[in-house]
Amino acid sequence: MILNRKSVELLAPAGTWDALVAGVESGADAVYLGGKHFNMRMHEGGFNFDDATLKKAIDYAHEHGVRLYVTLNNLISNEEIPALKEYLAYLNEIRPDALLVQDFAVLELVHEMGITIPLHTSVMMNTHNEHAIEKLKEYGITRIVVGREMTLSELSLFRERTGIEVEYFMHGDMCISESGQCIHSGVLFGQSGNRGRCLKPCRWAYKLIDDQTGEVLDAEGPGPYKLALKDMCMYRAIPQLIQAGVFSFKIEGRMRPANFIRRIVSTYRKAIDAYIADPNGYTTDEEGWKNLYENRARDFTTTFAFGQPGKKDIGFSGKREPRFFSHAVKEAGFQDEVLRQERAIEKENAPHRTLAVRVNTMDSAKAAIDNGADVIYVGGEAFRPLRPWKLKDYAEILAYAKTHGGAKVVVNTPRTTMRRECGELEQFFTELNSIRPDGIMVSNLGSLKLAQSITDLPVQADLSFNVFNQLAAKFLKENGLTMATTSYELSFEQLREIVETSELPLETIVHGSYESMICDHNFPAMSLPKYNELDNPEILDRRYALLDTAGEKHSIRIDQYGRNHIYFAKDLCLYPYLAKFNGLASYRIEAQDYTPEFTGLVTKLYRDALDKLSSSETAKGFLDLRAFDEVKEKSPRELGLGTYRFRQSRNSI
């Protein structure tokens, strides 16, 4: 590869006019910024650009030979779609060089409205496999901002196989969770990180404890801020970035002041130009490094660029944390004043309301079937000490379901499917052609494309698609999906809007334990003073949890790929309010963290309630308070309402 100035792009952030000017004057090839609507930095009114200034910014950038990208990269709710259409029409007039997008609704509208602006996927779309790229190319995507968990070696292969232009974060604040898979702020505060309002629970102090006994395990550990990832800094790895095939070097920081942007951009500009001019003779400019280091906010890390991060990549002391956006609070229980006042979803129910249960073991699957589940979801992630389902297990549960009432068996797949998982899924889907389950559930466009290319089985969408509006549901229907799961972050009002307008059948989770974050980090290994899984492999099978300063316990579940799933302290429970949840294609219980006995108990509770609701014109008398009290008593966690206690997930406009 012969390098020149056009071989790479230095991409600078801007939240104010002064920051825009600083980025351009300091040598940025491109600048990204947000309007006052629909982006991932919605906390501060003084940041982002109004419509008139946005046009002025585009003109200014183009006059200086700099490209300008507009971020349109958060989830959109139904009530925001009319404003989104107006905004897209305006953007099409003022002609930025690209739009960064997350929500499938934008892809739908761009096609429907004939928008001709190039599209880049935001990191929030969590694009992490080549099969997803092939699907996105069909919608005119020209560049991918790859997931933060992708190593440079993975990225290089990814780039080679797809030919897509790649953008990579190379400096700034990083999320500990997989992008688009953190709902902690949205559920706890009604301020969704997927809608630009994250209050950063990842920056709280936690203790690592034994999930069963409550014993504190890290009293001699490195510190309490266990999820506080340091800031990305790839300054010393510019050659590796370029040779891996990264085109756009992205600096994070749309809320940074102009002098900060000027210093960062000029330092990287000088280093990139030096490497391009003489790669063989290049060495790191130590003065440039000193400039970055002495003016850092947090300490630095390269996160996943060169492999799995460890404890050196976490700011355990919290001393360099520039700002705490929130503090730990108790999760809400049945604060149901809002939900009680909401009108019910006005959509006709099927004669029989479908109950689906996601299970973890063969015994739990049988318990769910025996107690009235119409559908069971099996497979996908297995949380240690449990082991993944084997091919013979799927055949066995299918035979059991057929002889015990005919429940459908849908095979789940991992929510994250990097290269290893995709390779395994190709063989697995081929085997499913012989096993013939009733369907497959997928969590990203890549596993969707694989499933559709290898099998003829019905495919449905799980939570990770972040269905937040009817246009996203329409996108999935057009791509052959038979059903989609609605987002945990929707308020009841927002859910009602989608259910009443969607042409795609929708499933909503009404009970169960659920993840606040999915992380590709090993938190026990980072925090425990003595942790060696090679000498002590059973340490992986221990059940861990994080205890926050409000006394709430967040269980950690480690799957077969080593990912850490962090759970909420309370389980979701909508049992007392089921009469309001009409028109759903499926009511789902998440029993992934339940025993077989408790799975059966909860399944029966909801089966009886749904049957009563189906047979009653008044929707009264469906509650079995004695059975409900037994579920509350035996539940591994207290019960709560999640986002359904909020009027809305805070608007992005």
Image (spheres, rainbow, N blue to C red):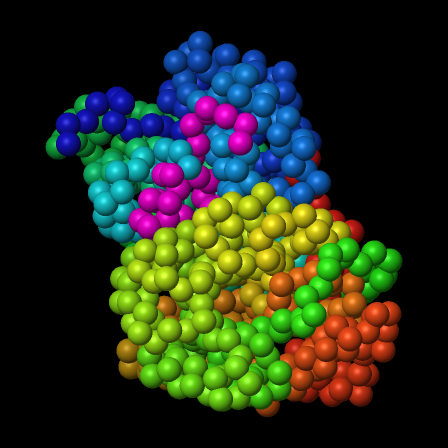
Residue 207 seen by the camera: no
Q: Relative to the observer, which residue lies in front, 15 or 229? A: 15
- Point out residue 207 in the picture as x, y percentages from the top left corner: 56, 70
Q: Image check: 50 left or right of 445? A: right
What stretch of residues is rendered in magenta?
Answer: 112-138
Furthest residue in direction top, as rendered: 63
Residue positioned 54% across, 27% down in the render: 113
Furthest residue in direction left, as rendered: 280
Residue positioned 34% across, 71% down in the render: 432
Q: Is residue 117 above or below residue 400?
A: above
Residue positioned 81% across, 79% down in the render: 623
Q: Image check: 545 left or right of 170? A: right
Say which quarter of the image contains residue 587.
bottom right
Residue positioned 29% across, 57% down in the render: 419
Q: Relative to the observer, which residue lies in front, 18 or 411? A: 411
Q: Relative to the observer, which residue lies in front, 614 or 192? A: 614
Residue 408 seen by the camera: yes
- Point out residue 150 in the picture as x, y percentages from the top left corner: 34, 51
Task: Give the quarter of the figure containing the C terminus.
Answer: top right
Q: Is residue 591 above or below residue 178?
A: below
Q: Is residue 118 magenta?
A: yes
- Point out residue 141 in the picture as x, y percentages from the top left corner: 40, 35
